[in-house]
Amino acid sequence: MTGLYPSVEPYEHGMLDVGDGNRVYWETCGNPGGKPALVLHGGPGSGAGPFWRQLFDASAYRIVLFDQRGCGRSTPDAADPQTSLAANTTPHLIADIELLRRRLGIDAWLVIGGSWGVTLALAYAEQHPGRVSELVLFSVTSTTRREVEWVTRDMGRIFPEEWERFRDAVPEQERDGSLVEAYARMLADPDPAVRERAAREWCRWEDVHVSVHRGHRPDPRYEDPHFRMRFARLVTHYWRHAGFLEDEALLRDAGKLTGIPGVMVHGRMDISGPPDIAWHLAQVWPDAELVLIGDEGHGLSGDATIDAIVAATDRFAGLGRDGRP
């Protein structure tokens, strides 16, 4: 069994002014002279938690984490209803990544992402392929309109009771339309009680549709009203705009990834992001390896998923698990 590496602390961190009134938190961990690696967290809005550092051998990697606009330690905070999200889009995030890369003096880096972070990683790599040495992706999503419809409506066939509650939290006249649009409107309501109910029900549904793997436990972050509001605002903002990408563009432009080695790790029981998303991408990205984990779901849902991710970062560092080439 591979398992996570020991936890490490940052040796450098800062706030990067990326414009539009936004300042992005970043940190570096591990070996300052090691192989550069960039972490792209999920959500959008989850923030870059310390567990990401444990996916790498800290003696071999210079690990870079940052909190995307509006979340984590970045400012302003999307949990504040007065925080505008107009300058919080995928093109803005890609520009932030490039600004951070130049700030840190990195020529090219391995990019790792999970869930929404996969969408962002693919968009970044397709726009800046010369800056990406390898890709390690898990819980593969591309945030198409079809994927958003799948999560917010079609999965009601799998969790009918829970989905009915999710649907019925919006006004009756909006229940047959776009639920992500309805929730986004509720999260912008002038009444704080309406906003709080929308955030709570959105996050409750988020916890349901990732719950298929054995031993699932509710995400404790959703108990924090501040996190709930931030997360729900950012997810609905990005989802209602299909990730601010032309629909199916990531798959269409996957030829730009030619020459970039990649590993995609995906749970076969992931119903939040069905495996066909990763499978179709693997058909048009010849340098990618698809690892399907038979009985695991979305995210870091089990040991086999973690092992496959760590095995990939070890391989791309040129290391065996014993730390030797």
Image (tube, rainbow, N blue to C red):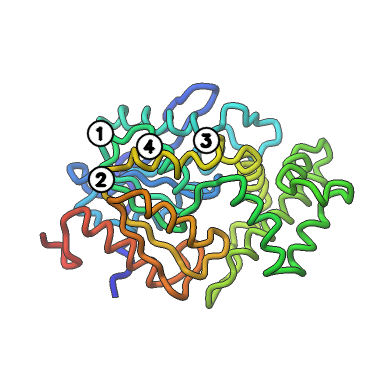
CB atoms of marks 4 and 3 within 8 Å? no
**Residue wearing tag 1:** 106
Amino acid tagged 3: Arg
**Residue wearing tag 2:** 62
Query: How far across and down, in percent of the image, does residue 32 sit?
Result: 21, 42
Between label 4 and label 1, give the one nearer the viewer: 4
Sequence-earlier tag: 2 or 4: 2
- Measured Cα–Cα span from mark 2 to mark 4: 23 Å
- Measured Cα–Cα span from mark 3 to mark 2: 22 Å
Q: Which mark is residue 126?
A: 4
CB atoms of marks 2 and 4 within 8 Å? no
Sequence-earlier tag: 1 or 2: 2
Amino acid tagged 4: Glu
Q: Nearer the viewer, residue 268 or 121?
A: 268
Sequence-earlier tag: 3 or 2: 2
Q: Nearer the viewer, residue 158 or 317?
A: 158
Sequence-earlier tag: 4 or 1: 1
**Residue wearing tag 3:** 69
- Measured Cα–Cα span from mark 1 to mark 3: 21 Å
- Can you say whether 74 is above or below 58 in the image? above
Q: Identify the residue at horizontal 53%, vertical 77% (top origin).
A: 214
- Give the total number of marks visible in the rendering: 4
CB atoms of marks 1 and 2 within 8 Å? yes
Amino acid tagged 1: Ile
CB atoms of marks 3 and 2 within 8 Å? no
